[in-house]
Structures are given as structure tokens and as C-alpha cells.
Amino acid sequence: MVKSFQFSKLPLIYFGSGKINLLPGLIKRYGSEIVLVTNPESFIRSPFAAGFFNSLQDNGIKYHHVIIPGEPSPDMIDTTTRNLMNERIEVVVSIGGGSVLDAGKAVSAMLYRKESVKEFLEGVGTMEHPGTKIPFIALPTTSGTGSEATKNAVISQVRKDGYKKSLRHDNFVPDIAIIDPQLTLSCPKNITAASGMDCFTQLTESFLSDKATEYTDALALEGLKQIKCSLRKSFLNGDDLDARSGMAFAALTSGICLANAGLGVVHGFASSIGGLINIPHGVVCGTLMATANAVSVRELRNTGSNPSALGKYALLGRLFINAGEKSDEYYIEGFIDYLMELTSELELPRFAQYGIGISDIDVICRITELKNNPIKLSLEAMHEIVRERL
Ligand SMILES: [Fe+2]
């Protein structure tokens, strides 16, 4: 029988090369005064920027430009909304990577509110957000977090007792997502690798999640097919528009899947490590993906607690390695080997590069949530996952 499920709403999605040209017309559906959120470099220096700013002017759209230099903190969101308090903002537009999209999502939810965003963060604040917001349009320039299709914005306070937590509401799914793979052509190699692995992790974790359904599985498998065809290619040749398009599709799909099926232990680590140390989300996911799955598979075999998860691992192996008639065991091993090879091919950095040492492991593991991982892992097993990537 098909498992019962509910499915979050989706943005109005425009996918394809050149779709950025629709933006001024779509903005005008809501009004003519916008907040434009970008990072300091990528989009502003891209070949699209000049034409884009001209088109805003031609369409009589007034914009307030907010620059987000990194992963958004509560202070960044509070300062932005305070500065815009006396403007008549009708729509928020984010053009950038996951951090820029999350920042825009949070600004659209917090504009014209008196409270700090901190009050509404899961596990940090005590208030529930009512879900009211300014319309929000998301245009990703990296293929990774899938924030263009999710209902949460990740806000980080990075320090020793820091956190990385979500502002979440069903209404925070962007109203419109414009996914134009041309915008990702200039994404640098290291970010292509890290964000691509984030997206790969999201698809795999939501596929293996104990909350996965037939609906999310169907989507996750289509996303994973694109990962297989496009991740390596987009890393090796950033100008390959076909590969960029495949990764843009995979990222969008991963956002839809994670919003509806949840994630696993790799994202548990991404939250805990990301709150303690300044390290890109995609790097944590990418560097841990292979070892975390290797340990989860071993524990699934040892405990025999979740045979359907092992069946899904075998299916992933069949998807990524075509070796004809072979056993499930062969394909499970094959999938783990594939991940190990990819980790070195994509030159994913180790934790030592970010100053994480052996003495940090216990603190990290004790605050890491397993989320919807298909197997409960012991503290020892979690130690092993991080230790492997120091
Ligand atoms: Fe992620």
C-alpha cells in the first residue's frame, strides 16, 4: 500500500536557460519597490548584472540593495530589517547561493516585525512565527542547498557556544523560484564541488529517511540521475551548460525532497559543526558523505534493524554503477566505493583545514542530531565518522 503523506506547497517554478529575463515582469505582479539581496561578488560581477539593473530601471522598479557576505546571522537579518523599516517594500528578491537565498527568505519573514529573528529560531527562541511575510522570489546561482524550494532559512551564530538553526514556516517556501542554469556558469570550482555534494547528500538522505514516501522517492531518484550525469562534469568543466542544468535540477529537487522527507546524520553534523566553526555547509556535507554512509551501512548490517534501508542502498548502487546482474551486497559496496572516489576526485577538504582537531570530536558528536537517519548511531560510531575526515 502507498504510505500516507502530506506534501508542502511549492513555489511557482520557472526552470531553464534565459528564465532570468522573466524577473522584472514577475516582480511587477507584486509591486515596484523591492529589496534585492545578493552576495558581494558573484552575481554583481556576472555578465547578467548590467542588463538586469537596466531592466529594473526600464520597468520603474525601485530597489534597495542588501549585500550578504556569508551565512546569515541574526544580527545581519535584524540590521537589514531595521534599516528598511520606513520603506514600502512589496517584494524581496534574492539572487545568490544558499546563504543569500536564506537571508532573503528571513528578511521577507521579518520585515515590519519588532522582534529579533532569534525569537523565532527553532531551539533558540520561544515564539512561533505566524507565517506572515512579504512575497519572496528566489534565483539560485549555485546548485546546492535547494533553498529555492524549502520552507526554512538557516541562520547561524558562529562561536564556541554558537548555533545554526532554522526559521521555518510552511508559508516561507518562496512564492516564485527562477532556476536559470546560466546563472551558475560562473560558480567557482570549489563551490561547485561543495554545493554539488550538499545537493547529493540531500537527495540521498531524504531517499533513505524514515520519513520518505513514494512521492519523495520518485523525485529523489530523478534528482540522483542528474547527479550521476552532471556532478563530475560540472566540476571538471564549469562552462558545460548541460551539466550545470542537470545540477540545477538536482538542487531544486533536493530542496523539495528534504522539505518533505527530512535529512540524516550528515546534516545533523552540518548543523552542529557549522554552529561552532566557520566552515561552509557544503564542505561539511561533502567531506562526511562517504564515511557517514559507510558507517550507517555497517551498522544497518550489524543490527539487521532496517532491511528496507539496505534495499535502498542497493538501489542507489544500481543507479550509480551499471554492472549488470550482481547481488545487493555488491551494489551496496559499490555505492560506498563510488562516494569514496568522488570525495577525492572533487578534492573535498578535510576538517583540519578549518582548525578542527581530535579534541573537538566529542563536543561535536554530543550535540549532533541524527535527524531521520535510517539507523540510530552510537556516540562511538559518530566519533568514527568525524575522525575519518580530520
Ligand atoms: Fe544541505
Image (spheres, grey):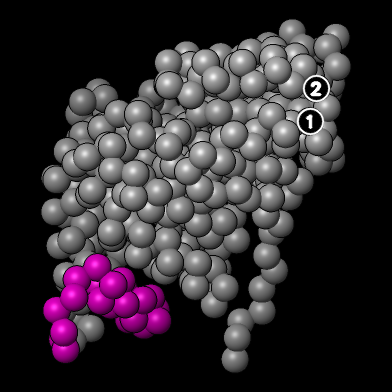
Q: Is residue 201 visible?
A: no
**Residue in the picture at 77% in, 17% down:** 60
Q: Dot 2: what SS?
A: loop
Q: Which mark is residue 235?
A: none
Q: Report x, y in % for residue 4.
A: 66, 79
Q: Report x, y in % for residue 329.
A: 19, 81
For the N terminus, which image quadrant? bottom right
Task: Report crowding for label 1: few under 14, some 14 to 19, many 20 or more residues within 10 A (C-alpha).
Answer: some
Extent of the magenta region = 303-326
On screen, residue 324 versus residue 382, left or right, reads left
Q: Disc 1 vs disc 2: Cβ atoms closer than 8 Å?
A: yes
**Residue in the picture at 30% in, 64% down:** 296
Q: Type of residue at label 2?
A: Ser
Task: Report crowding for label 2: few under 14, some 14 to 19, many 20 or more residues within 10 A (C-alpha).
Answer: some
* Label 1 sits on residue: 28
Q: In which image quadrant can residue 299 be found? A: bottom left
Q: Dot 1: what SS?
A: helix
Q: Which residue is at the front of the view, 263 or 300?
A: 263
Q: Type of residue at label 1?
A: Lys
Q: Report x, y in % for residue 194.
A: 31, 38
Q: Is residue 40 visible?
A: yes
Q: Is residue 167 above or below residue 309?
A: above
Mark 2 and ligand 1: say if the CB distance to the nearest ligand atom is below 8 Å.
Answer: no
Look at the image and say whether residue 291 sits in the magenta stretch: no
Look at the image and say whether residue 322 sits in the magenta stretch: yes
For the C terminus, which image quadrant? top left
Q: Which residue is at the front of the view, 45 or 100?
A: 45
**Residue in the picture at 44% in, 42% down:** 181
Q: Magenta: predominant secondary structure element?
A: helix
* Label 2 sits on residue: 32
